[in-house]
Amino acid sequence: MSSIWSAVDIAGTGANVDQTWIETIGSNIANMNDAVTPGQPVYQSQYVNAGPRVEPSGPSGPGAAAGVQVNAINLGSTKGQMQYDPTNPLANSKGLVEYPVVDLATQMTNLIQAQTSYQANAKVMSTAKDTYQSILNIKA
Amino acid sequence: MIPSIPAIPPVSAATAAGAAQPAGASGGLGTSGAATPGSFQNILGQAIDSLNGVTNHATNLSLEAVAGNATVADATVASVVASLDTQLASALASRAVTSLNTIMNMQL
């Protein structure tokens, strides 16, 4: 999507990536206490792999920069951390339960970073709109 | 003698889409008369058509965002772009009308 208001579009792609980022953090935090019996698949923490979005081709030349995009959602370790809890109904014969490896402090730090980035993109969008309007308001 | 200027035809959907020539085009201001692809009339029609599409897109994205099928950022971008497009079309149209009024007010 390309238009003469490209600055607004680019800020929108940034906000979309940040929303995906916040969603993955929310998923990680929501699943950090998912206990499973050792040997069963444990929740893998999600990481956003973002990169520059490139226009396929156009009048402005081949491959003009057009914001940012989510390339992939990378997954963390398949190995969880073991905890000794024999009273847990999910415990195996050795009394171990497996939990996903999610560091809450790291997730909270990333969450604040994602929120700041989203706000920055929203500010770019707002400023770009004001800038375009300033040239539309010129009275000849 | 200066020929009388015909009434401006209303912009119908067919005219905006560029599918049909307007009825009052023959004997217009220019020497050729018909609405050529580069004429102001055609450009204005296409601009209104494009503006209509942009505004509809913004409305649809807003509804999709409310329904949860689109992101808020996408809806906001579409809304801002539609607003800016409307203001640009309005500015250009009023500037064109000002130019026409300037010419019409010339004392010949």
Image: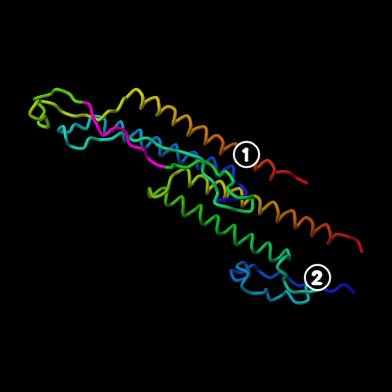
Q: Is residue B79 left or right of residue B36?
A: left
Instruction: Answer above or below: position of A121 versus A140.
Output: above
Q: Point out the residue furthest to the right here.
A: B108
Identify the magenta region: A72-81
Check the picture and name the quadrant holding the C terminus of chain B: bottom right
Q: Give how far apart the Cα atoms at labels 2 and 1 are.
A: 39 Å
Q: Secondary structure at mark 2?
A: loop
Identify the amino acid type marked 1.
Asp
Picture coordinates of residue A8, whole percent (x, y): 57, 43
Task: Describe residue A134's horizontal placement relative to residue B77 as left or right.
Answer: right
Q: Chain of mark 2?
A: B
Task: For mark 1, give the secondary structure.
Answer: helix
Question: Are the residues under marks 2 and 1 on the same chain?
Answer: no
Closest to the observer, B90 or A120: A120
**Residue B100's image quarter?**
bottom right
Residue ID at (75%, 77%): B26
- Which quarter of the picture shows residue A91? top left
* Residue B26 on the magenta span: no
Give residue B73's mark.
Answer: none
Dot 1 corresponds to which residue?
Answer: A130
Q: Quadrant of the N terminus of chain B?
A: bottom right
Give percent across and percent down for residue B28. Answer: 78, 73
Which chain does tag 1 point to?
Answer: A
Please name the residue that numbered disc 2 is placed on: B30
User: Badge 2: how crowded within 10 Å, few (<14), some, or many (20+)?
Assistant: few
In this rendering, is residue A65 above or below B8? above
Q: Which amino acid type is shown beneath numbered disc 2?
A: Gly
* Dots 2, 1 in contact, CB < 8 A: no
Image x and y of residue A64, in percent:
59, 46
Please give the name of the residue rendered at 61% of the width and 72% of the height, measured from the top-left corner: B19
